[in-house]
Image: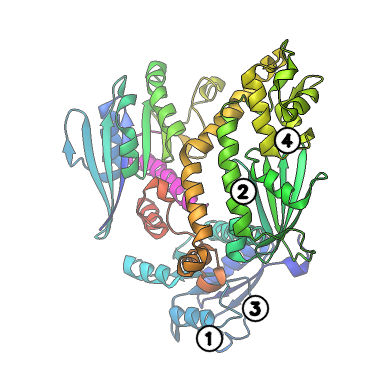
Amino acid sequence: MEDNENVKKILIIDNDNSYTGPLRNALSKKGYDVVCWDDGQKAIEQAKTIEADLLIAEVELPEYNGHTLYKALRARSDSKSIPFIFLSSQKRVDDRIKCMELGVDDYITKPFYVEEVVARVQALFLEISQQNEEQSKTEKGFSGNLTEMNLVDLIQTLELGKKSALLKLKHNSTLGVVYVMNGEVVDSSLEDLPPERAVLRMFTWTIGNFSVEIMPVNRERTIQRSNKELMTIGLRRINQWEQIRQELPPLNTIVTKTEVNNYDQLDDEEKEIISGVNEKKMIYEIIEKSRFDDLKALLIINKLYKKGYLQETNDNYFSNADNYLMRFKQNASRSKTTKERVASIISNVLNKSGDENRVEEHLSIERRQLPDRRSYGRRRTDRLPESNHIHLTKTDLLMIRERLS
Amino acid sequence: MRIGEVAIISYNAKENEDFIKSICRKIDVKNENLSFGRFEVNDQLALHLYGITIEQGDESLSWDLISKKTIGYIIIFNWDDRRIFEATKPTIDLFVNNFETSVLIIGNIKDKIDPPIPKKFFQPDGIPLSPNSRFTFCQVNNSEDAKKAMVLFVNMLIEKISL
């Protein structure tokens, strides 16, 4: 049994004891604290003080109408989030639609099976707790895959919402952190790189995971460039990075020096990189160990690869499946969306100041999409996902089910 | 008027017709490969049941387009005929693995007693299970039984909405 504080309180308003008695017993057995009132008028008068986790009320009682009670409760800020189930002897579809359109959470026709009502109540509480959990997760942060959302996307999202957050990115075994204060990137850390270079390196990460922790950030600003400047540089670098990378095997490919050793033909930067490949190394390891900027290092490696100074080793045979999968993932994410995404991000970043309305519209759409039981009382969604192209509402389906039964 | 369209699919036209008749009481339109019945909930809401008789190789039909129109698929096969199940399986695989649409798979039985299910019936050799698909036994020419299956199908849709 749960603690008293956690016991859900259910208020049933109906003057027909033949229904309320068995229902109260069944719900009490399931651990709910059930109170029954037979006076609807009292409920309307005491709407201000009703404390319940769920209200089950008959629509038509001699002295009151359930719709009036429902509206009275919804009108008050402290009771507008109480879930509401209507009971009714009315079988007419119009009545049911009217009730469902008011926004009640469920509608049960009398006579009913007590077990069914109990099951529906349990399902409703479960749904509410899942929604609350989801909402609380959304408020605290989110996580995901860098293939689907890279650092540019993340910064842009936080900038739009003017959020303060800790962005943690994991690529292979490397962990990087970006500090965002009121939507602006202010600091970052990645191994021993300077903050700005760390962010630029993380821009190129397309494989790995991220987590965003929405929280107050109070940090001295070490990155002086604005988001707009950072992302403009970042996007240019991503494009160059991608172009070079496509000419190379995946960056986790193990490479080694070839027999070619006439290093006199190489320039100083190329010599420096090749001298660092004393043993077998993955390409990204060479980049990370070099003193050069990542993009520069990648460019030099590409030159060495093309000139025949570097070659893949047999060790790659064993990781071919992984490489293929990674390549496929990279291609899948790149082929369809990168161009569009980059274009949209660039235009969004560069035109932001002249296009506040669009940003505001974007934000207001986001706000509308947030589940908010307090405002609407209805279930979060009443339609199947668009991908399914179903044009029936939940009310329709409930009516079909009842007609079939 | 709101209409939900459901595709009922089977190798045997009679199974489709039996099922539609059990739900809708009568078949409104019928030809060689298609039967149609209408289940009216009220004057503003109805289900349209299209019985589609398939043949081997019909996996290449434009099911993707049909999927956009239907609220889901009900696939019926004769439980007592293993060959029919084998023939139906590619269609089941196609729907379950490729479309978001809900799929109810019905093993049509002769009487109302559910037979035991052999282990091999499910993956890897048998029916692919996914959040969008469910299996049930049903005597499709029995109205009560067919309606129970239909309720199960509607419940799948309601659950999907509630997710």
What separation in Å lies between label 3 and label 2 (alpha carbons)? 54 Å
The picture places residue A231, in percent across and down from the top left corner, at: 60, 53
Residue at image position (80%, 64%) is A220
Q: CA distance from mark 4 to mark 3?
A: 52 Å
Q: Of the two numbered discs 4 and 1 on the same chain, state the one appearing first in sequence.
A: 1
Kindly report the distance in space between the C-alpha atoms of the residues bearing marks 2 and 1: 60 Å
Give the CA separation, mark 1 to mark 3. 13 Å
Question: What residue is disc 1 on?
Answer: A44
Query: Is label 3 on the same chain as label 2?
Result: yes
| Residue A263 coordinates in the image, percent (x, y) | 74, 18
Residue sitting nearer the eye, A259 or A67: A259
Q: Amino acid at mark 2?
A: Gly
Identity, as a three-letter code, of the amino acid under mark 4: Asn
Secondary structure state at the residue bearing disc 4: loop
In the figure, B51 relative to A399: above or below?
above
Which chain letter goes with mark 3?
A
- In the picture, the disc for residue A51 is 3
Residue where numbered disc 2 is placed: A234
Q: Residues within 10 Å of mark 3 (few under 14, many from 20)?
A: some
